[in-house]
Image (tube, rainbow, N blue to C red):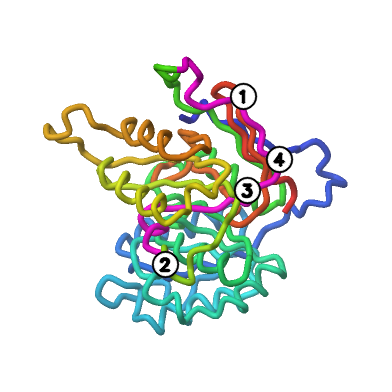
Amino acid sequence: MHNDHDHHHHHDHHGDCGHDHGPKHIYIYSPSSAVRDKAAFKRGIARLKALGHEVEVDVDALASHTRFAGDDATRLAAIHRAAASGADVALISRGGYGLSRILPGIRYKAVAKAIGQGMKFVGLSDFTAFQNALLAQTGAISWSGPALGADFGVAGEPDDIMEACFDDLLTGHGEGTGWRMHREKPDATTGKPAVPDIYVKSAQLWGGNLAVLASLVGTPYLPSVKGGILFLEDVNEHPYRIERLLTQLLHAGVLAQQKAVVLGQFNQYKLVPHDKGYKLQSVVDWLRTQIKAPVLTNLPFGHVETKVLLPVGATVSLSVEERDALIYWGHL
């Protein structure tokens, strides 16, 4: 997957490009699960500091209350401190679980105000709940991307594509992301390619973790996106569970309203003898029979080392030419 990723930005003329290449202020906080891997946490902070950034760690970043990074009030306060920090980026320490139960208590307008002043909220996994609630409540854009521990705190070197995309976010260079989709057989009856060549000029990008997103259906925290581009990923979910989650979005009318569905990485599951040939591709094939919109594959995003950053709520264009796909958002 490393080799199949194209990075779209322009580094031609730093001198007068209007981009800020100085060190950035990064705020680390824990809105979900408690940090258990303290070594990874420390490595992540050291890594960001080594890149020249100012790293501010929330007072309760290492709090622990059963599974959670502190009780509900503690985690809400951490989110609001992040929003008030004046940082360039608010980066979660980790995902896990914990945002769903505090969605009603988040001061979305305060978060949106911070974003309006240039702050970028970055995270993934459980953070999908926060991102989509924020979008539904305010229309503000946040970024699906790395977490501190799992991405910057790895024992070896952090993934170079992830770091390049994060750097692009910090400097204002990131304008889009291109990737190569899986090689798939043409449709057996029509002979048409699995994904047709398409160009979608203007659509709202949204999505994230499939299980978390499905849990927002029927709540005030699921954005009502019409004509959007929905991207999805998940981890530790057997393909039949992925299909069942997709049926929830399908039967709720969400999928029919999208111009495209973009599947990221679905991993860390085990097939069993009972499957008898049923696999992830079976789910993709089934999904294509249920919706008219194209279903793209292999977006480099999910619970994997190589992950791009994606602006949730931004207006983007999408193009597909054979196996090459590009989501482009320009300068946000």
The amino acid at mark 3 is Asp
* Residue in the foreground of this view, choosing between 223 and 59: 223
* Residue topped by disc 4: 201
Sequence-first tag of 2 and 3: 3
Q: Label 3: how many residues lie within 10 Å, few (<14), some (14-19) or many (20+)?
A: some
Instruction: Work out whether residue 174 can be spotted.
Output: no
Task: Tell me the distance, in whole angstroms, between the alpha carbons under discs 1 and 4.
Answer: 14 Å
The amino acid at mark 1 is Glu
Residue 40, horizontal then vertical, whole percent:
37, 56
Of badges 4 and 3, the one in the foreground is 4
Of badges 1 and 2, the one in the foreground is 2
Element type at marker 3? Answer: helix
State the residue at coordinates (66%, 38%): 200
* Residue in the foreground of this view, choosing between 323 and 54: 323
Task: Tell me the distance, in whole angstroms, between the alpha carbons under discs 1 and 2.
Answer: 36 Å
Element type at marker 1? Answer: strand
